Image (cartoon, rainbow, N blue to C red):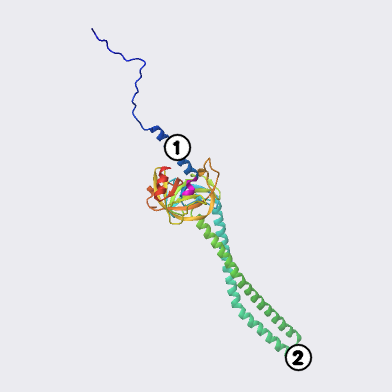
Amino acid sequence: MRRLRLRPRADTLNNDIRRSTVAWTRLVYFGVLLLLGLWFGDFLFGSYLYLKSEGMVIAPSATISTEYPATVRDVSVREGDHVTAGQRIAGVSSQQVSESVARLTSELARLRTQEAQLRIQGERNGSLLGLASQRSQLASETRERYETLQRRGILPMDKRMAAMDSEYRSLLDSGALKAETDAIEQQLPRLASVIDKAEAALDNMDRLYGSGDVIAPIDGIIGRRNVETGTVITPGDVLVEIYGNESYVLAYVPTGTLYSVKAGDRVVVEWGVRSAYGRIAAIEPVAMALPKEFQTAFKPVARNQLLRIEFEDASDRASLPPLFAKVGIHSGGVIGRIIGTIF
């Protein structure tokens, strides 16, 4: 007799033994929520708990312009060129300045000629004044003798009148010479002052204009060039802008924070994935509104205090951020570095 194979019953279900697994998805979910919460809290209140701000890299600048209308003859620099103080950067010509120089030179020559004439006339009057005084004294003595003789009846009246007329004319000439000498002595200092002012104006115009060369006042980098050869400029028009070599960071720090900073504190300056160390050089006693590039859509415009931060290794330009770059600032401590790296 053949035994049939037992078949499992359809109504019998065996329990499957499942492997125990960790709920990784749940851990990831709560981890993401925690990071979002920390980020949002840091976004709202982080700047009040530790030093965290933004700033811009700037440098001392010099604006090159003219005080007179001119025509640009040539420009010898381009944007980004390094220049030194005293280097020629452009050449201009001005018809108005040329006419002013010619007019001042002619006026100065006339004043010097007038001064020379007055000096000559004063010396001549000085030499004649003594002789005129002697003549006046002699005429007075002659008139007195004639009066004595006339009272005795020895001398006729017409002789006495001639002596009086001679004395009068000698006194008149002597007084005119003395008055003219005094006037010359008063005019010479005033004329000398006018000559000094004319010479100073001519020297100042020559210093400002020279031969038409525009000179760089500081060492730095050409930032913006606004003119080309042949451009006609008016007084105050900017030719070029020069930014100095010593760059620094102007940072904006919230007021009323739970931390405090002081001059000399070390900070970290970050731009992109790069960073550099700096120190707070000055804490300005003013608060200013944030520029547009530092404003956020979810916060009202606030006024933050200004910090001036200088780089520790300012000599290595390659390791520093470029001018006008937006940078982040945070504390140089361990906690500040960790939070600044995460967020």
Instruction: Say few, some or many: other residues with alpha carbon within 10 Å of mark 1 (under 14 / 14 to 19 / 20 or more).
Output: few
Q: State which tag comes first along the sequence, 1 or 2.
A: 1
Magenta residues (range)? 45-49
The kind of residue on which mark 2 rests is Arg
Where residue 168 appears, as percent x and y from the top left, is 70, 80
The answer to the question of whether label 1 and label 2 lie on touching residues, with beta carbons closer than 8 A, is no
The kind of residue on which mark 1 rests is Leu
SS class of the residue under badge 1? helix
Q: Residue furthest bottom?
A: 152
180 vs 262, nearest the viewer: 262
Compared across the picture, whether 9 is left or right of 309 comes to left
27 vs 234, nearest the viewer: 27
Return the mark for residue 56.
Answer: none
Q: Where is 274 relative to 188, above or below?
A: above
Q: Residue furthest left?
A: 1
Quarter of the picture containing the N terminus is top left
Q: Residue furthest front?
A: 1
Return the mark for residue 151.
Answer: 2
Quarter of the picture containing the C terminus is top left
Where residue 2 appears, as percent x and y from the top left, is 24, 8
User: Is-magenta flag for residue 334?
Assistant: no
For image coordinates 57% across by 57% down, the residue present is: 103
Whole-angstrom CA distance, mark 1 to mark 2, is 138 Å
SS class of the residue under badge 2? helix
**Is any part of residue 24 visible from this angle?**
yes
Where residue 144 appears, as percent x and y from the top left, is 71, 88
Residue 5: image quadrant is top left
Query: Residue at label 1?
Result: 33
Counting the numbered discs, the total is 2
Instruction: Say few, some or many: other residues with alpha carbon within 10 Å of mark 2 (under 14 / 14 to 19 / 20 or more).
Output: few
Report the predominant secondary structure element of the magenta stretch. helix
Compared across the picture, whether 86 is left or right of 177 comes to left
